[in-house]
Image: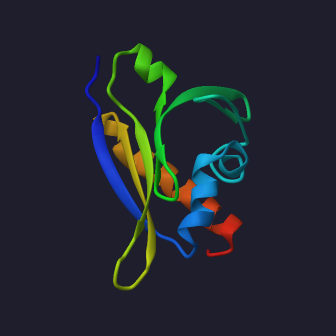
Amino acid sequence: MDDKTKFEIEFPIQASPQLLYQYISTPSGLSEWFSDNVNSRGELFTFIWDDSEEQAKLLSKKSGERVKFRWVEDEEDGASCYFEIRIQVDEITKDVSLMVTDFADDDEVDEAKMLWENQISDLKQVLGSA
């Protein structure tokens, strides 16, 4: 099993935490920006792209705050990887950010960050905050 590198990225975003939470925690919200389509059965989410699909298990969620998923294939590899999308609100300025925590192989971290940047940019367009 390869140890993956954990990374975290912050994306300032103009939207209310309640609205953002709908986009990061529901199949219909996630299918607007994260993948082409999303189905869920209980805690198992199936993310569908053009010609591939991947399943992830919802590990935890806290309303208005965060969701945490683990790809099923990572679980089968025994990897302790997950990806978490957390909504962070600055107590003073009330600025809202999305904090993304994810894991990637050492040589794929930059690529993984770029993928998140593209996806969050899609989310901002959907929200009209681009």
Asked whether, in this view, residue 93 is left or right of residue 37, the answer is left
Q: Quadrant of residue 122?
A: bottom right
Let me know if residue 68 appears in the view: no
Q: Residue furthest front?
A: 63
Q: Which one is nearer the viewer's eye here, 1 or 89?
A: 89
Q: Which one is nearer the viewer's eye here, 20 or 36?
A: 20
Asked whether, in this view, residue 85 is left or right of residue 90, the answer is right
Q: Is residue 68 above or below residue 10?
A: above
Q: Picture coordinates of residue 106 (x, y %)?
A: 28, 37
Asked whether, in this view, residue 112 is left or right of residue 127, the answer is left
The quadrant in which the N terminus is found is top left
Total numbered badges shown on the rendered structure: 0
Identified at 38% across, 15% down, the residue is 77
Identified at 34% across, 16% down, the residue is 78
Q: Which one is nearer the viewer's eye here, 130 or 63?
A: 63
Q: Is residue 8 above or below residue 68?
A: below
Q: Quadrant of residue 119?
A: bottom right
Asked whether, in this view, residue 127 is left or right of residue 121, the answer is right
Identified at 29% across, 42% down, the residue is 6
Q: Picture coordinates of residue 60 (x, y %)?
A: 45, 39
Q: How is the image coloured?
A: rainbow
Let me know if residue 118 appears in the view: yes
The quadrant in which the C terminus is found is bottom right
Q: Picture coordinates of residue 62 (x, y %)?
A: 47, 49
Q: Which one is nearer the viewer's eye here, 83 or 16?
A: 16
